[in-house]
Protein backbone atom coordinates (compact mmCIF):
# COMPACT_ATOMS: atom_id res chain seq x y z
CA UNK A 1 0.00 0.00 0.00
CA UNK A 2 1.32 3.43 -1.00
CA UNK A 3 1.66 5.80 1.99
CA UNK A 4 2.10 9.56 1.90
CA UNK A 5 4.70 11.20 4.11
CA UNK A 6 2.36 14.15 4.75
CA UNK A 7 -0.30 13.39 7.35
CA UNK A 8 -1.82 14.30 10.72
CA UNK A 9 -3.14 12.13 13.51
CA UNK A 10 -4.51 12.83 16.98
CA UNK A 11 -6.03 10.86 19.82
CA UNK A 12 -6.73 10.88 23.56
CA UNK A 13 -6.67 8.19 26.18
CA UNK A 14 -7.99 8.47 29.71
CA UNK A 15 -7.72 6.44 32.86
CA UNK A 16 -8.38 6.92 36.54
CA UNK A 17 -5.10 8.78 36.86
CA UNK A 18 -5.83 11.34 34.16
CA UNK A 19 -5.96 12.20 30.43
CA UNK A 20 -3.19 12.05 27.79
CA UNK A 21 -3.44 13.76 24.37
CA UNK A 22 -1.14 12.96 21.42
CA UNK A 23 -0.74 14.79 18.09
CA UNK A 24 1.34 13.54 15.16
CA UNK A 25 2.35 15.68 12.17
CA UNK A 26 4.66 14.67 9.34
CA UNK A 27 6.10 16.11 6.16
CA UNK A 28 8.34 14.58 3.53
CA UNK A 29 11.97 13.95 4.38
CA UNK A 30 14.70 11.76 2.95
CA UNK A 31 15.05 9.79 6.18
CA UNK A 32 13.05 9.28 9.36
CA UNK A 33 13.42 12.29 11.65
CA UNK A 34 11.35 12.23 14.85
CA UNK A 35 10.90 15.32 17.03
CA UNK A 36 9.32 14.65 20.45
CA UNK A 37 7.74 17.13 22.82
CA UNK A 38 7.02 15.30 26.05
CA UNK A 39 6.29 16.61 29.56
CA UNK A 40 8.87 15.47 32.08
CA UNK A 41 6.18 13.50 33.90
CA UNK A 42 5.75 11.30 30.77
CA UNK A 43 9.43 11.04 29.85
CA UNK A 44 9.43 7.33 30.77
CA UNK A 45 7.27 6.67 27.68
CA UNK A 46 9.81 8.12 25.24
CA UNK A 47 11.55 4.83 24.47
CA UNK A 48 8.40 2.80 23.71
CA UNK A 49 7.01 5.74 21.73
CA UNK A 50 10.06 5.87 19.46
CA UNK A 51 9.89 2.11 18.94
CA UNK A 52 6.27 2.32 17.83
CA UNK A 53 7.03 5.16 15.42
CA UNK A 54 10.02 3.32 13.91
CA UNK A 55 7.82 0.29 13.20
CA UNK A 56 5.02 2.33 11.65
CA UNK A 57 6.98 4.98 9.71
CA UNK A 58 10.03 4.50 7.48
CA UNK A 59 10.60 8.00 6.13
CA UNK A 60 9.47 11.54 6.90
CA UNK A 61 9.92 14.30 9.44
CA UNK A 62 7.49 13.47 12.24
CA UNK A 63 6.61 15.89 15.03
CA UNK A 64 5.02 14.37 18.13
CA UNK A 65 3.36 16.48 20.84
CA UNK A 66 2.15 14.86 24.04
CA UNK A 67 0.25 16.61 26.83
CA UNK A 68 -1.49 15.35 29.93
CA UNK A 69 -4.00 16.39 32.56
CA UNK A 70 -4.08 14.81 35.99
CA UNK A 71 -7.48 13.79 37.29
CA UNK A 72 -8.69 15.62 40.38
CA UNK A 73 -8.93 13.06 43.16
CA UNK A 74 -10.00 13.36 46.74
CA UNK A 75 -6.88 11.48 47.77
CA UNK A 76 -4.75 14.38 46.58
CA UNK A 77 -6.06 16.49 49.47
CA UNK A 78 -6.41 13.71 52.02
CA UNK A 79 -3.45 12.25 53.89
CA UNK A 80 -3.18 8.50 54.17
CA UNK A 81 -3.26 7.29 57.78
CA UNK A 82 -0.76 4.51 57.11
CA UNK A 83 1.61 7.01 55.52
CA UNK A 84 1.33 9.33 58.51
CA UNK A 85 1.98 6.47 60.95
CA UNK A 86 5.06 5.41 59.01
CA UNK A 87 6.31 8.99 58.90
CA UNK A 88 5.87 9.36 62.67
CA UNK A 89 7.81 6.15 63.33
CA UNK A 90 10.65 7.29 61.08
CA UNK A 91 10.74 10.69 62.81
CA UNK A 92 10.96 9.00 66.23
CA UNK A 93 13.83 6.81 65.05
CA UNK A 94 15.66 9.82 63.63
CA UNK A 95 15.29 11.77 66.92
CA UNK A 96 17.14 9.03 68.78
CA UNK A 97 20.22 10.19 66.88
CA UNK A 98 19.22 13.83 66.33
CA UNK A 99 17.18 14.88 69.40
CA UNK A 100 16.67 18.43 68.12
CA UNK A 101 15.24 17.33 64.75
CA UNK A 102 12.06 19.36 64.17
CA UNK A 103 8.82 17.84 62.94
CA UNK A 104 7.82 18.60 59.32
CA UNK A 105 5.07 21.10 58.63
CA UNK A 106 1.69 19.99 57.30
CA UNK A 107 2.51 21.46 53.86
CA UNK A 108 5.78 19.50 53.72
CA UNK A 109 3.99 16.30 54.67
CA UNK A 110 1.37 16.80 51.95
CA UNK A 111 4.01 17.57 49.30
CA UNK A 112 5.98 14.49 50.25
CA UNK A 113 2.80 12.45 50.04
CA UNK A 114 2.08 13.79 46.53
CA UNK A 115 5.65 13.02 45.39
CA UNK A 116 5.37 9.46 46.60
CA UNK A 117 2.07 9.09 44.79
CA UNK A 118 3.63 10.48 41.58
CA UNK A 119 6.41 7.90 41.72
CA UNK A 120 3.87 5.13 42.23
CA UNK A 121 1.79 6.46 39.33
CA UNK A 122 4.60 6.42 36.71
CA UNK A 123 3.62 2.98 35.40
CA UNK A 124 -0.03 4.04 35.15
CA UNK A 125 0.92 7.20 33.24
CA UNK A 126 3.07 5.21 30.80
CA UNK A 127 0.20 2.81 30.13
CA UNK A 128 -2.32 5.54 29.30
CA UNK A 129 0.31 7.43 27.31
CA UNK A 130 1.01 4.43 25.07
CA UNK A 131 -2.72 3.87 24.61
CA UNK A 132 -3.03 7.43 23.30
CA UNK A 133 0.00 6.98 21.04
CA UNK A 134 -1.36 3.77 19.54
CA UNK A 135 -4.71 5.41 18.81
CA UNK A 136 -3.03 8.48 17.28
CA UNK A 137 -0.84 6.25 15.11
CA UNK A 138 -3.90 4.42 13.83
CA UNK A 139 -5.51 7.72 12.80
CA UNK A 140 -2.18 8.88 11.37
CA UNK A 141 -1.73 5.74 9.27
CA UNK A 142 -5.28 5.92 7.92
CA UNK A 143 -4.68 9.42 6.60
CA UNK A 144 -1.28 8.47 5.16
CA UNK A 145 -2.80 5.57 3.21
CA UNK A 146 -5.72 7.68 2.01
CA UNK A 147 -3.43 10.40 0.66
CA UNK A 148 -1.06 7.77 -0.70
CA UNK A 149 -3.91 6.25 -2.72
CA UNK A 150 -4.63 9.65 -4.23
CA UNK A 151 -0.97 10.07 -5.17
CA UNK A 152 -0.90 6.60 -6.71
CA UNK A 153 -3.95 7.34 -8.87
CA UNK A 154 -2.41 10.59 -10.12
CA UNK A 155 0.85 8.81 -10.96
CA UNK A 156 -0.98 6.02 -12.77
CA UNK A 157 -2.54 8.69 -14.96
CA UNK A 158 0.93 9.94 -15.93
CA UNK A 159 1.95 6.34 -16.54
CA UNK A 160 -0.83 5.89 -19.07
CA UNK A 161 0.27 9.06 -20.86
CA UNK A 162 3.85 7.77 -21.07
CA UNK A 163 2.65 4.42 -22.40
CA UNK A 164 0.65 6.20 -25.11
CA UNK A 165 3.79 8.07 -26.24
CA UNK A 166 5.76 4.80 -26.33
CA UNK A 167 3.09 3.15 -28.47
CA UNK A 168 2.94 6.11 -30.86
CA UNK A 169 6.72 6.08 -31.24
CA UNK A 170 6.76 2.34 -31.92
CA UNK A 171 4.06 2.76 -34.56
CA UNK A 172 5.88 5.65 -36.27
CA UNK A 173 9.35 4.04 -36.24
CA UNK A 174 8.99 1.92 -39.46
CA UNK A 175 7.61 4.92 -41.37
CA UNK A 176 10.46 7.13 -40.21
CA UNK A 177 13.06 4.57 -41.30
CA UNK A 178 11.36 4.11 -44.69
CA UNK A 179 11.22 7.87 -45.24
CA UNK A 180 14.93 8.12 -44.45
CA UNK A 181 15.80 5.40 -46.95
CA UNK A 182 13.88 7.29 -49.61
CA UNK A 183 15.67 10.56 -48.79
CA UNK A 184 19.00 8.76 -48.79
CA UNK A 185 18.35 7.26 -52.24
CA UNK A 186 17.42 10.67 -53.64
CA UNK A 187 20.55 12.25 -52.17
CA UNK A 188 22.76 9.56 -53.65
CA UNK A 189 21.20 10.07 -57.07
CA UNK A 190 21.54 13.86 -56.83
CA UNK A 191 25.18 13.56 -55.72
CA UNK A 192 26.03 11.16 -58.53
CA UNK A 193 24.31 13.35 -61.11
CA UNK A 194 26.20 16.40 -59.83
CA UNK A 195 29.60 14.66 -60.07
CA UNK A 196 28.96 12.74 -63.25
CA UNK A 197 25.90 13.62 -65.32
CA UNK A 198 24.44 10.48 -66.73
CA UNK A 199 26.42 8.40 -64.24
CA UNK A 200 23.46 6.12 -63.59
CA UNK A 201 24.16 4.56 -66.97
CA UNK A 202 27.50 3.32 -65.56
CA UNK A 203 26.14 1.95 -62.23
CA UNK A 204 23.96 -1.09 -62.08
CA UNK A 205 20.76 -1.15 -60.08
CA UNK A 206 22.21 -3.85 -57.83
CA UNK A 207 25.21 -1.69 -56.90
CA UNK A 208 23.01 1.29 -56.16
CA UNK A 209 20.64 -0.83 -54.08
CA UNK A 210 23.54 -2.30 -52.14
CA UNK A 211 24.91 1.15 -51.38
CA UNK A 212 21.53 2.43 -50.24
CA UNK A 213 21.02 -0.70 -48.15
CA UNK A 214 24.41 -0.22 -46.47
CA UNK A 215 23.73 3.41 -45.62
CA UNK A 216 20.25 2.54 -44.39
CA UNK A 217 21.64 -0.15 -42.15
CA UNK A 218 24.16 2.24 -40.61
CA UNK A 219 21.40 4.76 -40.04
CA UNK A 220 19.13 2.16 -38.51
CA UNK A 221 21.83 1.26 -35.99
CA UNK A 222 22.21 4.91 -35.05
CA UNK A 223 18.51 5.66 -34.67
CA UNK A 224 17.16 2.30 -33.55
CA UNK A 225 15.22 3.03 -30.35
CA UNK A 226 13.48 -0.32 -30.05
CA UNK A 227 15.61 -1.31 -27.04
CA UNK A 228 14.90 1.98 -25.28
CA UNK A 229 11.18 1.62 -25.88
CA UNK A 230 11.26 -1.97 -24.63
CA UNK A 231 13.03 -0.92 -21.45
CA UNK A 232 10.55 1.92 -20.97
CA UNK A 233 7.71 -0.59 -21.18
CA UNK A 234 9.43 -2.74 -18.56
CA UNK A 235 9.89 0.26 -16.27
CA UNK A 236 6.24 1.21 -16.69
CA UNK A 237 5.16 -2.32 -15.75
CA UNK A 238 7.30 -2.14 -12.60
CA UNK A 239 5.89 1.29 -11.79
CA UNK A 240 2.32 -0.01 -12.06
CA UNK A 241 3.23 -2.93 -9.81
CA UNK A 242 4.73 -0.64 -7.15
CA UNK A 243 1.66 1.60 -7.22
CA UNK A 244 -0.79 -1.29 -6.89
CA UNK A 245 -2.47 -1.86 -3.48
CA UNK A 246 -0.98 -5.38 -3.15
CA UNK A 247 2.59 -4.22 -3.88
CA UNK A 248 3.61 -4.33 -0.21
CA UNK A 249 2.36 -7.90 0.28
CA UNK A 250 3.94 -9.04 -3.01
CA UNK A 251 7.33 -7.58 -2.16
CA UNK A 252 9.92 -10.38 -2.33
CA UNK A 253 11.66 -11.25 0.90
CA UNK A 254 15.16 -9.87 1.20
CA UNK A 255 14.36 -6.65 -0.70
CA UNK A 256 14.90 -3.57 1.43
CA UNK A 257 14.16 0.09 0.96
CA UNK A 258 11.01 2.17 0.99
CA UNK A 259 8.68 2.43 -2.00
CA UNK A 260 9.56 6.10 -2.43
CA UNK A 261 13.27 5.33 -2.82
CA UNK A 262 12.57 2.52 -5.26
CA UNK A 263 10.37 4.86 -7.30
CA UNK A 264 13.10 7.49 -7.36
CA UNK A 265 15.60 4.98 -8.76
CA UNK A 266 13.03 3.81 -11.33
CA UNK A 267 12.47 7.37 -12.54
CA UNK A 268 16.22 7.82 -12.99
CA UNK A 269 16.25 4.80 -15.31
CA UNK A 270 13.20 6.05 -17.22
CA UNK A 271 14.79 9.48 -17.64
CA UNK A 272 17.94 7.84 -19.00
CA UNK A 273 15.91 6.04 -21.67
CA UNK A 274 14.14 9.29 -22.59
CA UNK A 275 17.51 11.06 -22.95
CA UNK A 276 18.77 8.28 -25.23
CA UNK A 277 15.62 8.53 -27.30
CA UNK A 278 16.23 12.26 -27.72
CA UNK A 279 19.89 11.78 -28.67
CA UNK A 280 18.87 9.29 -31.39
CA UNK A 281 16.11 11.52 -32.72
CA UNK A 282 15.86 11.10 -36.49
CA UNK A 283 12.74 13.21 -36.84
CA UNK A 284 10.80 15.92 -35.12
CA UNK A 285 8.42 13.20 -33.88
CA UNK A 286 11.21 11.55 -31.89
CA UNK A 287 12.34 14.90 -30.50
CA UNK A 288 8.84 15.84 -29.34
CA UNK A 289 8.31 12.37 -27.87
CA UNK A 290 11.54 12.63 -25.85
CA UNK A 291 10.56 16.07 -24.52
CA UNK A 292 7.07 14.92 -23.54
CA UNK A 293 8.51 11.83 -21.83
CA UNK A 294 10.93 13.91 -19.76
CA UNK A 295 8.15 16.28 -18.69
CA UNK A 296 5.90 13.40 -17.59
CA UNK A 297 8.74 11.65 -15.76
CA UNK A 298 9.51 14.89 -13.92
CA UNK A 299 5.85 15.15 -12.87
CA UNK A 300 6.04 11.57 -11.59
CA UNK A 301 9.17 12.43 -9.63
CA UNK A 302 7.48 15.44 -8.02
CA UNK A 303 4.54 13.32 -6.90
CA UNK A 304 6.87 10.63 -5.56
CA UNK A 305 8.59 13.15 -3.27
CA UNK A 306 5.66 12.72 -0.84
CA UNK A 307 5.63 8.90 -0.96
CA UNK A 308 7.24 7.00 1.88
Image (tube, rainbow, N blue to C red):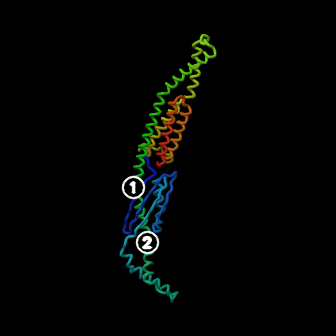
Residue at screen point 52% across, 52% down? 31
Q: Residues within 10 Å of mark 1 (few under 14, many from 20)?
A: some
Residue 204 image position (x, y, % from top left): 59, 12
Left or right of 125 on screen, residue 189: right
Q: Residues within 10 Å of mark 2 (few under 14, many from 20)?
A: few
Between the residue at mark 2 and the residue at mark 1, the CA separation in whole angstroms equals: 31 Å
Mark sitting on residue 139: 1
Q: Quadrant of residue 190?
A: top right
Q: Nearer the viewer, residue 88 or 115?
A: 115
**Considering the numbered disc 2 on the image, is that residue within a helix, a strand or a loop?**
helix
Q: Nearer the viewer, residue 283 or 237?
A: 283
Q: Is residue 28 above or below residue 184?
A: below
Residue 263 image position (x, y, % from top left): 49, 44
Q: Nearer the viewer, residue 97 or 30?
A: 30
Q: Which marked residue is nearer to the observer: mark 2 or mark 1?
A: 1
Residue 206 image position (x, y, % from top left): 58, 14
Query: Which residue in the rendered view is the most extreme toward the top?
Result: 201
Return the disc, 2 or 1, that comes first in the chain's sequence.
Answer: 2
Q: Is residue 301 above or below residue 18?
A: above
Residue 41 image position (x, y, % from top left): 46, 68
Residue at screen point 49% across, 58% down? 34
Q: Quadrant of residue 109?
A: bottom left
Residue at screen point 38% across, 63% down? 13
Left or right of 238 on screen, residue 79: left
Mark sitting on residue 120: 2
**Considering the numbered disc 1 on the image, is that residue within a helix, a strand or a loop?**
helix
User: Does the CB distance between marks 2 and 1 fall below 8 Å?
Assistant: no
Amino acid sequence: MICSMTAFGAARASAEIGLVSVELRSVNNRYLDVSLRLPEELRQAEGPLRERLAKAVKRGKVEVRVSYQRAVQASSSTLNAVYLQTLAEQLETARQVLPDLRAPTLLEVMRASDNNASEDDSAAWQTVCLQAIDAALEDFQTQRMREGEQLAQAMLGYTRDILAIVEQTETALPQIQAAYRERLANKLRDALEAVSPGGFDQISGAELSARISQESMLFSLRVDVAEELTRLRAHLSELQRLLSPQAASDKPSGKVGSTGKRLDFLFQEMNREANTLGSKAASIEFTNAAIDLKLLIEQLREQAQNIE
